[in-house]
Amino acid sequence: MWKSIRRLFKANSDKRFRVLILGPANAGKTTLLERLTDSPAGAAIVTRNGKRVKGVPRGYDQRGIHNIDDEITYASNPAFVFHDSGGFEAGGVEELEAVWKFIRKRSLASPLKQLHAIWLCIPTDNDRPLGFLQSGFFSESTASVPVIGIFTMLDGRRTKVEIQVLGPAPHPSDFLDRAQEVDQKVAEFVNGLETQFHKERYPPAGFIRVGNMDEVSMRSIALCDQLLLVTMDALPHETQRSLLRLTVWKRNRRIHTIFVLKRVLHAGTDGSIVARAQQPVQDEESELHADKGFRILMGCKSGSPPLDALSLADINN
């Protein structure tokens, strides 16, 4: 099993999963990519016309300092290729034309250059985060390239709501007493945004909510895994899903196993792993499910070590 997977990955080592990331300026796009690829700040490698662009600043995604055709990769996981639209602002005609030109061009490209997914970052710490919808982007279909809506900066939204609910200098005990009210108001705000998207002619194929992505933590890692699960669920073709599985294999064997379980075991109904991926993190249950299913696939005994205990040596043998 391990040898066959290793051979499959080697045979497809030149195939990479290509994502266009959209969103207004300061929407948390760069931070999201750094967490997803487990990279430090400023580690992006930008390639233009086959040559690396030297001296690219951390804020390369700021408006006016980008080229949508640039390929953004990270040494920690070069199997992902990202394209950044720069600031996707309200009424930005030039930006919108550049985005659609890029999408159409990539749809006609060779398989290695085709676009596979679009991630749209919506900063929820902004009181009017959907101004860019005025551009009319969702009035046209992206065909086989699914759009995933990513509600970012949830920690910033929560801070704003806490100030509204508790005041500028609350007593520590008030946080516990009013936490449920704060949670409810944050959820209502984001639910309202999602409802507005569903009114569009071609709304996103899936949504996910993320926050505290500046911190490298188990939660931020789990949220990145959820993003990949939601993306996988939205991909319309098996070839695209296979490519994402190969890409993720190098990053996280556990999330790859969940992909396999979805395909082979059809894990769950309403409580499926992907359904839970759009809810607050309940990672322990998903992990236990994955480990159990993995042992079924591998014919392991119940006393076998969990998936995390498998070393790289196991893959190489």
Image: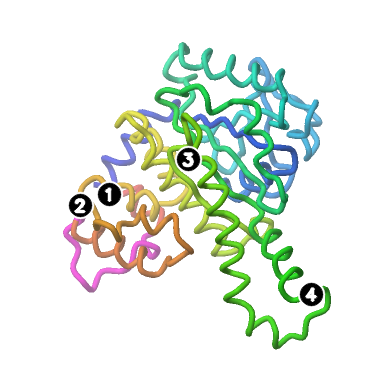
Q: Earlier in the sequence, mark 3 or mark 1?
A: 3
Label 1: which secondary element: helix
Residue 111 pos. (x, y %)? 42, 18
Q: Is residue 43 above or below residue 133?
A: below
In the orientation shown, which residue stands out farthest toward the bottom?
173
- Contact between labelled residues 3 and 2, with CB atoms less than 8 Å apart: no
Mark 3 residue type: His
Q: Nearer the viewer, residue 40 or 206?
A: 206
Q: Which residue is mark 4?
A: 167
- Contact between labelled residues 3 and 4, with CB atoms less than 8 Å apart: no
- Contact between labelled residues 2 and 1, with CB atoms less than 8 Å apart: yes
Cα gap from disc 4 to disc 3, whole angstroms: 33 Å
Q: Label for residue 69?
A: none
Label 4: which secondary element: loop
Cα gap from disc 2 to disc 3, whole angstroms: 31 Å
The stretch drawn in magenta includes residue 304:
yes
Q: Label for residue 262?
A: 1
Q: Earlier in the sequence, mark 1 or mark 4?
A: 4
Of badges 4 and 2, the one in the foreground is 4
Q: Nearer the viewer, residue 211 or 113?
A: 211
Instruction: Report the residue at 42% width, 56% height from top.
Output: 277
Mark 1 residue type: Lys
Residue 194 pos. (x, y %)? 52, 47
Cα gap from disc 4 to disc 2, whole angstroms: 50 Å
In the image, the segment drawn in magenta is 297-310
Instruction: Report the residue at 62% width, 33% height from top.
Output: 133
